[in-house]
Amino acid sequence: MGPDHLLLALSWISDRSMPDRFEDPDKRRELTEEGEALRERFAEAGIDPDELRGALRAALAEAEDEPVPEDGVPVNLALMRTMGRAGQLGEDNHAGVIELLRAILEQPPPRCREVFELLGVDEPLYAFFPEIPRPAIGAEAELDSEAERDAALDDLDVAVP
């Protein structure tokens, strides 16, 4: 399991029928709020979560038959990094669905990048989070803007309403 599976789970949480699958009213309310926050981000990016879910499921099914590359990051390590980053983004090291989404998109795994390209989204981080400053163009500007971007990413408030 890796960040791409986590993105798949987030696409399910965005489904309006998800809260109806739980009897606990607190869980239903929480899923309703989280689903709405995710739907807003998907709308911002112009992506239908159902299309993303279908494309990602197909890509993950294909991946089951492929060997893990020797020079690649182990999937569980990539997931741990994503979860750690989401915790950094969250308040008091608590990651909500928006922080998880952003952490995935900051360093999307290859399958996620392929699926976003298939859906016509070249820069998913900026599509979902347009408030994040884009890096400047040019080699010198890249060095300066990378530090500025990292600082801006750390300063952004991504609390779920």
Image (cartoon, grey):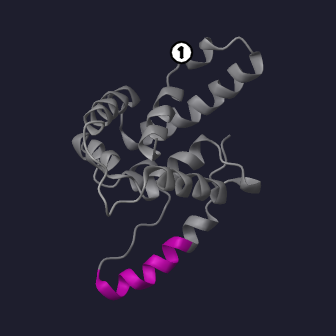
In the rendered view, does 114 fall on the left or right side of 20? left
Q: Quadrant of the C terminus?
A: top right
Q: Is residue 157 left or right of residue 117?
A: right
Other-residue count near label 1 (Cα within 10 Å), few / some / many at <14 / 14–19 / ≥20: few
Furthest-bottom residue in this view = 140
Q: Amino acid at mark 1?
A: Ser
Relative side of 156 to 39, left or right: right
Q: Say whether residue 139 is left or right of residue 39.
A: left
Residue 81 position in % (x across, y down): 54, 58
Q: Residue at x 49, y 50 (%)?
A: 76
| Residue identified by numbered label 1 | 17
In the rendered image, the vertical position of residue 109 relative to residue 52, given as above or below: below
User: Percent position (x, y) of residue 51?
Assistant: 32, 29
Q: Which stretch did the figure color magenta?
A: 138-150
Can residue 20 be found in the magenta stretch?
no
Q: Is residue 49 above or below residue 26?
A: below
Q: Which residue lies at the image location 75% right of the left edge and 15% below the top edge? A: 24
Between residues 125 and 68, which one lies in front from this camera angle?
Answer: 68
Residue 112: % across, % down: 34, 46
Q: Nearer the viewer, residue 19 or 46?
A: 19
Residue 96: x and y in percent read 64, 43
Quadrant for residue 141, please give it.
Answer: bottom left
Identity of the residue drawn at 46% across and 66% down:
133
Dot 1: element? loop
Residue at the (57%, 30%) spot, across then down: 36
**Residue 143 sits inside the magenta stretch:** yes
Q: Main secondary structure of the magenta part?
A: helix
